[in-house]
Image (cartoon, helix red, strand yellow):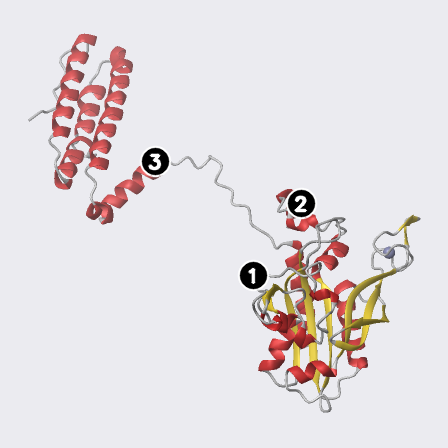
Amino acid sequence: MYSVPKLKSFSEAALDKAVEKLLATLKTESKAVKNEEDWKAFRDRWMARKNGVLTQINDLWLKASPKDSKRDVGQRVNEIKAKVTEVVEGRQIKGISRAAVDSLEFRDSVRAEVTQRLDITLPGIRRPLGAEHPVIKTMHEIVSVFRNLGYSVQEGPVIETDYYNFEALNFPPNHPARDTQDTLFIARQESKPQRERLLLRTHTSPVQIRTMEKMKPPIRIVIPGVVHRNDPPDASHSPMFHQIEGLAVDTNITFCDLKGTLDHAMKALFGSSVKTSFRPSFFPFTEPSAEMLVSCFICGGSGKRNSEPCRPCKQTGWIEILGCGMVDPNVYAFVDYDPRKVSGFAFGMGADRIAILKYGVDDIQLFFNGDVRFLEQFG
Ligand SMILES: [Zn+2]
């Protein structure tokens, strides 16, 4: 068996010969490694701190060398160390077994290797944190205002039947909203009776019906969700957008409750100085119906911004923000409520529109293009 010789001469020729013999032995012995046991013995023989071959050449060659050949010997010893490490590791990777990986000893040796090579000054891998989409963020804010008033959140399917989207909400059969110009219908539904035909819901109101079918009054719910309409995309329209609706049904609910609730909600959302105003409107499922306006929170209701006309409120000082009304008694008939005993109000607003106003965005498409440069401004 090979043992590291003491060198009589440190001449280049002598060193060459000694190194050559050592490397030849390394090659032969590495070939003889057949299993993990062999490999461990091989590793220890060459690399063990105590009496390994590398330690021996350090002692017998480098330390023993005369001053003038130290540099040459040192260089050779370093090369040998690198070569030995490479060969020992190479054998190890090839002969690796599951058991070896699991053995603590092996893991420790790998860890030691990794630690030795780890350059902690290298920059790490950056994992930028995501952020809420501005529309989702706005929805969460609106929902939380109503949650604080004791409302609970309800959700429902985006693909709805004509019954829940229109019929049960008191839309007459020939209402223009039922037209394909306005509503996106699922294809090949013609053979079904109208009330069973599937469509992409045009508002979140079907969830009001679904909830009233399941629950008896008192009901206080908010319904956030995605809705679709057959609108070509432009700066203020998108075929897909987000709504938040609310419904409160109980005994003795009046229009005053509606006004008080929504006035509070707007102050919570836009600041305590905003005023609200109601004007008559029409929706099939509420009677009476109203549109609610808030005083423009961008120009403070003056219609002007630094002597420039205020665009969001079109210089009127008011912004139309939602539709609302007292639930039409006809709707209660669809869900088995007694309109003589209960009353309630409903309201709905576009979350995208509110996000547009809030963040001063001038094109709704920006929300849905998925351009990170736009979105990360809200992070
Ligand atoms: Zn304004």
Query: Label 1: which residue?
Result: 188
285 over 139 or under it: above or below = below
Q: Which mark is residue 116?
A: 3
Residue type, mark 3 in image? Gln
Rendering quadrant holding ligand 1: bottom right
| Residue 46 in picture, x, y percent from top left | 17, 30
Residue type, mark 2 in image? Phe
Q: Label 3 neighbourhood size at 10 Å, few (<14), some (14-19), many (20+)? A: few
Quadrant of the rendered image containing residue 17: top left
Direction from residue 71 to residue 279 in the image, left or right = right
Question: Viewer-nearest of labels 2 and 1?
Answer: 1
| Residue 347 in picture, x, y percent from top left | 74, 72
Q: Label 2 neighbourhood size at 10 Å, few (<14), some (14-19), many (20+)? A: few
Q: Residue furthest bottom?
A: 341
Query: Label 2: which residue?
Result: 374
Q: CA distance from mark 3 to mark 1?
A: 67 Å
| Residue 210 in picture, x, y percent from top left | 60, 76
Residue type, mark 1 in image? Arg
